[in-house]
Image (cartoon, rainbow, N blue to C red):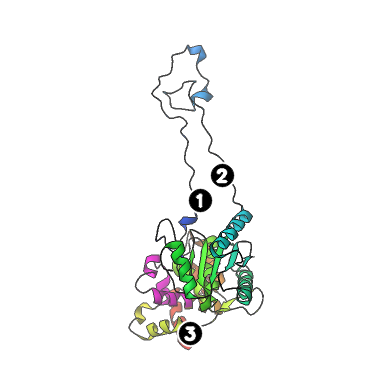
Amino acid sequence: MPPRAPRIPPAFALLLLASLAPPSLGTGCAGQKTDVRPTPRPAAREAPPAERTLGSDDARSDDRPAPVAAPPVDPYDLVADREARTADAKNRLGATTPTATVSDVFLLVGAHEWRGHAFERSVALVQNAMTAFLNGRFGKKPERAITVYLFPNGATYEAFCKRTYEAPCIAHFGFYEPGKRFMVMNAGLGLGTLTHELVHPLVEADFPRAPTWLNEGIASVFEQPVIPRTGEIHGAKNWRHPRLLRALEGAERPTTRLDALFGMADTTFRGDGEDLHYAMARYVCQWLDQRGKLWAFYQRWRDAVEDDPTGEKSFAVVLGQTPAEAHATWAKWVRAL
């Protein structure tokens, strides 16, 4: 699902990403000209060259304040952030609200009735998914803590959005807000949303220049996660398939092409055909994964993005075909699912 765009003062969010950049340090005022004219002095007492270089040529007074160094930036404290987020969650939802930390950075919060066995299943799923995601797939994980709110139904989910954002939730299943580093989801509809949303901060950390179609395509594969063994994760066919199949068989067929995704602007992806674009991206990524090529393609594109901004070169190297050449094989596979 898309990262939440800031909709209300002061914040939310899916993509992304400039909102996480630390604030720039301001420059100091050393060397600024002053209205006070320097007092003439004998040549023998002229300031040494090291002093003269501190300011402008016409402001060399010994009385001028020395430059002030910018204060050091406090290092980020992950443990302190997790503790603060735990306290914040319990303040919002109650002192007995269960929490658990996975992979050091994901703080899971069992909101309201999402407790006991349901919460334990959620924690286990995130543990298994993260083990697989970091096993030869993503090269980095987020460095800062992310709070994952799990609500048991639509009513509690929507109530949280109204309290927190003074607006309805932006997606039916759930969303990721980079600004607050919140994942908020209606877990009662299924935990596939959880494994979908986990992908977004991973892509954000590992491949910040990834286009929306790749980010959402990979995330959508794991809406129907299959974890056959420790360290492995795949995706099965899900509810997006009928939308893609209708497009391939109907009037949208000319534009429903694998190669149409390469170079697609993020705004186009989010435009009028967003539901179809999601389905295309999802099933391109699942097709690549079933062929054992998804992660080789992703990693090569990530590492070569400066020279390959659209990903077409990386696709051709990994697949041995251009995206246009691979379209017919992909479309045949989609129809056969």
**Front-lying residue, 263 or 196:** 196
Pinpoint residue 315: horizontal percent, then vertical percent: 49, 71
Residue at mark 3: 333
Pinpoint residue 94: horizontal percent, then vertical percent: 57, 65
Magenta range is: 257-282
Whether residue 211 is visible to the viewer of this picture, yes or no, is no
Pinpoint residue 177: horizontal percent, then vertical percent: 48, 63
Residue at mark 2: 73
| Element type where label 1 sits in the image | loop
Q: Are marks 3 and 2 in contact (CB under 8 Å)?
A: no
Side of 188 relative to 243 (left or right): right
Return the disc, 3 or 2, that comes first in the chain's sequence: 2
* The magenta stretch spans residue 273: yes
Residue drawn 60% across the image and 60% down it: 86
Decide: is 142 above or below 40: below
Give the class, few, some or many, for how many residues have Cα within 10 Å of label 2's Cα (few <14, many ≥20). Answer: few
